[in-house]
Image: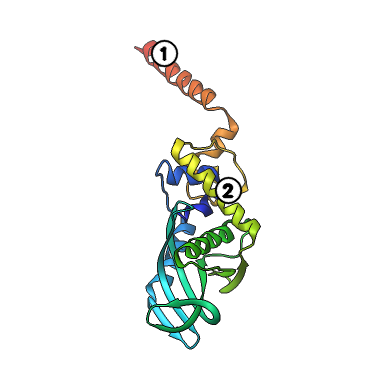
Amino acid sequence: MLSGLQHFVFCRRQWALIHVEQVWAENLRTVEGSLLHQKAHDSLDRESRGDLFILRGVSIQSRELGVAGQCDVLEFHRCSDGITLKNKEGLWQPYPVEYKRGVPKENDADRLQLCAQAMCLEEMLSCDIANGALFYGEIRRREEVVFTHALRQKVRGCLEEMHDYFQRGYTPRVKPFKGCSACSLSELCVPKMLRQKRVEDYVNEALSESLGLMHTQEDNE
Ligand code: SF4
């Protein structure tokens, strides 16, 4: 799933728990995020405004990259070197827009997801897409993203790694970091427990406690 790219960039273990092990937990952020996407998709699915044509909730895929997903909003801007569209006069340049809750992130997760969408659209529509935009719900503003060669290479690298993990059914080990406090899977991933002690020590400790309890019960009988 193309949307998994943002999980993978945030934390490879989180991505594997969701997409390889099929574990999912909702928290406030994920609920708010899905409501924002629903809002983007619930509006009219197509709209024309002069030199702008808008489609919403567009299914996309790339055979080359091996991903599929959805584009929240796909704008087409009338221009002289765009592509033709069915039942539309003139030439149009595709411009993907992705809706996100919150504010722009420090990492590249959102930019990579948008770039991957553009790469899918380029393959599907046989065109070049130089840029798109991220819309952030908290600041209610767009941030333009240029799809550079470096960003595209990073998308390819991440997707290759994701395919490799998926085929091997591999879930990376816990490496706690500050993002864990906002992670919807923190209760399932248990980073604090694993940071404090090794699993083996934890299990041995739990067994000793149980044996101790059993001895106490026998002594009392
Ligand atoms: S709790 Fe931390 S290490 Fe575990 S999946 Fe979430 S972000 Fe990754």
Could you say which is closer to the camera, residue 94 or residue 125? 125
Q: Residues within 10 Å of mark 1 (few under 14, many from 20)?
A: few
Type of amino acid under label 1: His
Question: In the picture shown, does residue 53 fall above or below 22?
Answer: below
Please indicate whether residue 119 sits to the left or right of residue 44 in the image.
right
Image coords of residue 193 (percent x, y): 54, 34
Could you say which is closer to the camera, residue 100 or residue 194? 100
Residue at far bottom of view: 50
Residue drawn where x is 44% and y is 64% of the image: 124
Where ligand 1 lies, by image quadrant? top right
Residue 39 makes an appearance in the image? no
- Residue tagged by mark 1? 215
Q: Distance of mark 1 from mark 2, alpha carbons?
A: 56 Å
Residue 60 is labelled as none
- How many discs mark residues in the rendered view? 2
- Residue tagged by mark 2? 157
Residue drawn where x is 59% and y is 32% of the image: 196
Q: Residues within 10 Å of mark 2 (few under 14, many from 20)?
A: few
> Which color mode does the image show?
rainbow
Disc 2, SS: helix
Question: In the picture shown, does residue 173 fall above or below 95?
Answer: above
Question: In the picture shown, does residue 111 fall above or below 55?
Answer: above
Disc 1, SS: helix
The quadrant holding residue 36 is bottom left
Front of the two marks 1 and 2: 2
Q: Work out whether mark 1 precedes mark 2 in sequence or the reverse, and give the earlier one.
A: 2
Residue 193 makes an appearance in the image? yes
- The quarter of the rendered structure image containing the C terminus is top left
Image coords of residue 114 (percent x, y): 54, 62
